[in-house]
Amino acid sequence: MERGEALELLEHGTIFDMGKRADSARRNLHGNIAYYSVNAAVTYSNICQTLCPICSFARREGSEDAYLLTPAQAHERAVKFAEKGAREIHIIGGMNPKLPLDYYLDFVRSVKSAGYGINIVAFTVSECVLMSRVSGKPLDEVLKMLMEAGVNALPGGGAEIFDDSIRSKISPNKLRAEEWLDAMRTAHLCGLKTNATMLYGHIETPESVVDHLLHLRGLQDETGGFKAFVPLPYRRGKSDISSKSSGIYDIKITALARIVLDNFPHIRVPITHFGDRQAQVLLNFGADDIGGTHWMEEVAVSAGAKRMERSESFMRSIISVAGFDPLGGNSNYAH
Ligand code: SF4
């Protein structure tokens, strides 16, 4: 689909027209299956120097509620989650230039050593680029060291929206759009599979949404390294930037993504961000994956999402009630 047609759909298409096309594309790829994973998050620190205006999670070093986990604490948490049934751990945290590369490597090894064949999805490319800058090692070398330590995939965060004039307002100190895409290209060339996110519902324009998708589709044509596209509705939390997210907008974004990203295997709508009911609706509008149980999801909780301890049987029932066949595993779609 060309840019003009995608823009026309986003601005003037009805959810019914878009849904029909998206559902047909989704069913061609996955039939009646909908995926979920049993996973948990170990967020190593909320100390972040980037201080994006849209973020309610980050704390300055020295703040009363700032924290930094040790690798030993990470190990303890990973064991606890694995014993409870998690087979995948997500690791992300704030941007802290005081942390050496060895801290991240030890952290990953500590989580991996919990056993149970845990799949580790860790670090946005922004964090990886920071590790590269701090250590003075090229990004590909850092990524290979992370892989050796136990990282299986990158989660795909920090993409926000690929329009530098908008990025300069919502996350002025993060990687620019081109830098994010370059870092992802490097990760894919190193053999790391990744996801790709898009944060919407803030001050983005329809053009920036369509261009974001087209940039991702272009890179996927080049590398084939993306597993899932993950739309993320912006929640205001304590930020000054208001949210224009809505149920209808969620549907249009999800459907448009499925239609435009014809080379992406999966469209994931994390239940932690969309809630149970909206995730069920979105399965009918192009999505095929409701994400994971995500026990302890610190970032979403601090931005206003309700903390819920979802069980595997709950995830399965959410999918079944929506009329789909649940298939669980980890987010590498290994079952
Ligand atoms: S969004 Fe990420 S990089 Fe930005 S302030 Fe929050 S934790 Fe830091």
Image: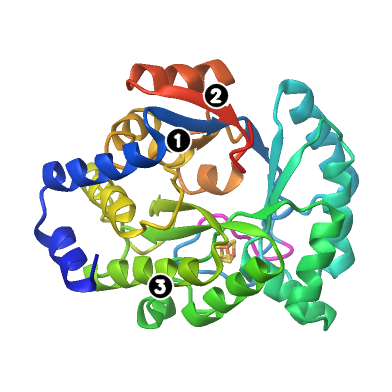
Of the residues under marks 1 and 2, which one precedes in the sequence? 1
Secondary structure beneath label 3? helix
Which residue shows up at 51% across the image and 72% down it? 222
What number is the disc on residue 310?
2
Q: Please identify the quarter of the rendering in which residue 130 is found.
A: bottom right
Which residue shows up at 18% across the image and 59% down it? 10
- Ligand 1 shown in quarter: bottom right
Instruction: Please state, as top left, top right, bottom left or bottom right, where the C terminus lies in the image.
Output: top right
Q: Depth check: give the residue in front, 255 or 40.
A: 255
Looking at the rendered structure, the kind of residue marked 3 is His
Image side of residue 288 versus residue 111, left or right: left
Percent x, y for residue 275? Answer: 39, 33
Is residue 305 at least partly visible in the picture?
Answer: no
Distance from Cα at disc 1 to Cα at disc 2? 10 Å
Dot 1: few (<14), some (14–19), or many (≥20) neighbours within 10 Å?
many
Image vertical order of residue 203 relative to residue 107, above or below: below
Please check the rendered image and state whether residue 57 is part of the magenta-colored stretch, yes or no.
Answer: yes
Is residue 301 at least partly visible in the picture?
Answer: yes
Distance from Cα at disc 1 to Cα at disc 3? 26 Å
Query: To which residue does mark 3 refer?
Result: 215
Q: Quick check: marks 1 and 2 in contact, CB under 8 Å?
A: yes
Of the residues under marks 2 and 3, which one precedes in the sequence? 3
